[in-house]
Image: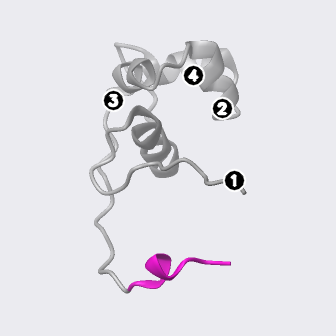
Amino acid sequence: MLKESFLVNRPPQPPVAVQSNVRELRLAAGLSQQSAAERFDLSLRVWQTKEAAANPALLSQGEYELLLLLAGRHPHFVLAPQNKK
């Protein structure tokens, strides 16, 4: 059941511009390269290309915003622990 607070009409937030600061965000999220690759369902090698200093392969919009959330740096949203009953 949705809580009423989720039903509040809010204007849509603009998308966050995808940047190449993947390594910085991964470290802020407390993830190793291997654990980040697993969380994003990528091979370690593919993840490493996304962190490469020269010619990084950018994350998709969704991947980048999830990484921002995990790092606690999303400009519009924060993760909250789930209340288990």
| CA distance separating discs 4 and 1 | 33 Å
Residue at 47% over, 84% down: 7
Earlier in the chain: of badge 2 and badge 4, it is: 2
Q: Nearer the viewer, residue 46 or 78?
A: 78
Residue at 64% over, 15% down: 34
Using residue 84 as the reference point, say whether residue 13 is left or right of it: left
Residue type highlighted by circle 3: Ser
Earlier in the chain: of badge 1 and badge 3, it is: 3
Q: Nearer the viewer, mark 1 or mark 2?
A: 1
List x then y, in percent, for residue 74: 33, 46
Query: Residue 39 shows which numbered tag?
Result: 2
Q: Nearer the viewer, mark 4 or mark 1?
A: 1
- Circles 2 and 4 in contact, beta carbons < 8 Å: no
Above or below, comparing residue 12 to residue 7 in the picture? above
- Circles 2 and 3 in contact, beta carbons < 8 Å: no
The residue that label 1 is drawn on is: 84
Label 3, secondary structure: give it.
Answer: loop
The residue that label 4 is drawn on is: 47
- Circles 4 and 1 in contact, beta carbons < 8 Å: no
Residue 37, quarter of picture: top right
